[in-house]
Image (tube, rainbow, N blue to C red):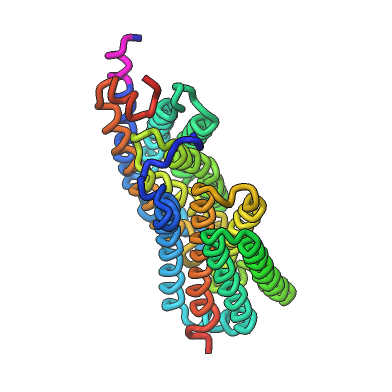
């Protein structure tokens, strides 16, 4: 099945970023997260005080650090794709490595935040807000971990497959997924940490 | 079996999908007063008896009937599995996972229906606390074993997305199915909350999860399965991406 040529001609166009499959997946994943965000907002509207108290127990600086780490990681992966297109393999490898390191930084930051919460006796069942906090950030973390694994796999294969269109498409797909993870966080951070917290 | 008989059998089986939707809605949903179900985690046993089981005499027959309807889901899932073949006509692990998930989901629907029927029949004979315990346990089983349905949906979605030779189902339907299957995960929060979107009748765990499952997974695949089985045998082979 995996050896079959892609059905959409745009999938073989080097100027068309990624393949149709990843765009479809991202659209649907975005819709799922969008629904989750809407449910969160409706609950926050229903119980403003519970959510305000929950938000006050978060550390916005940790969220900001995560944002900067993820944005920089996304930039590194995007510039790795540009380097690959220009056949600069060493630069592409370095930038992918940088993307992974920064992504791991985000993971460490998030785990540290979870640790602080659990240490203070706060868990997913502490309040409606924290159910959403752990669910949304947990699902985002799962996406991020998958993305890191995919970037690591691409980095490993880069030296041998850099000249092939299929590899370029693969890396573009991974890059699009990584941007999506980044964009999700740009919604999650203000929604959970900032809006209505003070 | 002759080709015409095979086509006829598949067409009958394809209609067990829509039949499941209609009869499950009528029996489990309308007669069982489950649109939405009561939030038992926020109710005492006495409240569950007076406001639900003791109030609606249609629950017992509705649940017994829904148990029979559950098997329609199994037959539809079996037909679907038979369509998920590789280019040589062989079933794959994904087909078998889809089948296993569909059978288990059908069985779960039937089993839980009978457990709720037990509560409805015994409502005035046993302690309300026992009614609540059995009712709650049944909902825990029904919701928290979502993994059976999720594996069915993910396997079906992966087949749809990865088998680029088949034209029975569009890729978007495959991705949507995977996303909805994974969207069941918050069901595990249900045993621990008494209020909000993750309770049994909550916005996420009932309206969004069941709504998306019914309309965007079951509705969509029902449509494409029905469309497929009414093609000629030759066109069905082409649509399934089978070698001539």
Residue, x 43% and y 68% (percent of image)? A39
Q: Residue furthest top?
A: B1
Q: Is residue B32 magenta?
A: no
Residue B117, quarter of the rendered image: top left
Toward the viewer: B49 or B200?
A: B200
Residue B18: percent from the left, percent from the top? 30, 36
Left or right side of A19 for B192: right
Residue B132: percent from the left, percent from the top? 53, 52
Q: Is residue B6 magenta?
A: yes
Left or right side of B143 for B231: left
The stretch in magenta equals B2-9
Magenta segment main secondary structure: helix
In the displayed structure, B92 sits above or below B6; it is below
Toward the viewer: A97 or A34?
A: A97
Could one spot residue B13 in this view of the protein? yes
Toward the viewer: A104 or B150?
A: A104
Residue B121: percent from the left, percent from the top? 45, 40
In the displayed structure, A67 sits above or below B218; it is below
Q: Residue furthest front?
A: A87
Left or right side of A132 for A156: right
Residue, x 68% and y 67% (percent of image)? A101
Q: Residue furthest bottom?
A: A198
């Amino acid at each position: 099945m995996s050896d079959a040529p892609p059905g959409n001609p745009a999938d073989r166009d080097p100027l068309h970023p990624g393949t149709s499959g990843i765009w479809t997946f991202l659209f649907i994943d975005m819709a799922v997260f969008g629904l989750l965000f809407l449910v969160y907002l409706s609950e926050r509207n229903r119980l403003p005080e519970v959510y305000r108290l929950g938000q006050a127990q978060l550390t916005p600086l940790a969220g900001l650090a995560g944002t900067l780490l993820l944005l920089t990681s996304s930039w590194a992966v995007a510039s790795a794709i540009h380097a690959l297109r220009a056949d600069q393999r060493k630069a592409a490898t370095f930038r992918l490595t940088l993307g992974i390191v920064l992504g791991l930084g985000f993971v460490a930051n998030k785990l540290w935040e979870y640790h602080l919460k659990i240490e203070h006796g706060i868990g997913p069942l502490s309040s409606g807000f924290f159910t959403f906090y752990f669910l949304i950030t947990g699902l985002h973390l799962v996406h991020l971990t998958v993305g890191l694994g995919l970037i690591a796999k691409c980095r490993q294969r880069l030296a041998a497959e850099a000249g092939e269109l299929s590899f370029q498409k693969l890396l573009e797909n991974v890059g699009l997924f990584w941007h999506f993870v980044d964009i999700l966080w740009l919604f999650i951070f203000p929604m959970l940490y900032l809006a209505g917290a003070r | 079996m002759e080709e015409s008989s095979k086509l006829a059998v598949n067409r009958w089986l394809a209609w067990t999908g829509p039949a499941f939707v209609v009869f499950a809605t009528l029996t489990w949903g309308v007669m069982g007063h489950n649109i939405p179900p009561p939030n038992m985690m926020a109710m005492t046993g006495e409240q569950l008896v007076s406001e639900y089981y003791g109030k609606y005499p249609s629950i017992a027959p509705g649940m017994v009937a829904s148990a029979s309807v559950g098997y329609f889901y199994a037959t539809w899932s079996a037909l679907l599995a038979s369509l998920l073949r590789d280019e040589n006509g062989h079933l794959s692990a994904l087909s078998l996972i889809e089948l296993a998930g569909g059978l288990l989901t059908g069985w779960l629907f039937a089993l839980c229906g009978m457990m709720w029927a037990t509560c409805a029949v015994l409502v005035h004979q046993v302690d309300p606390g026992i009614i609540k315990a059995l009712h709650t346990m049944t909902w825990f089983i029904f919701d928290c074993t979502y993994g059976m349905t999720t594996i069915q949906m993910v396997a079906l979605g992966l087949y749809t997305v990865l088998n680029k030779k088949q034209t029975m189902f569009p890729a978007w339907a495959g991705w949507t199915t995977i996303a909805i299957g994974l969207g069941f995960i918050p069901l595990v929060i249900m045993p621990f909350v008494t209020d909000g979107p993750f309770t049994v009748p909550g916005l996420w765990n009932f309206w969004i999860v069941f709504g998306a499952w019914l309309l965007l997974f079951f509705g969509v695949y029902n449509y494409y399965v029905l469309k497929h089985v009414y093609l000629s045998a030759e066109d069905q082979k082409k649509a399934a991406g089978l070698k001539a």
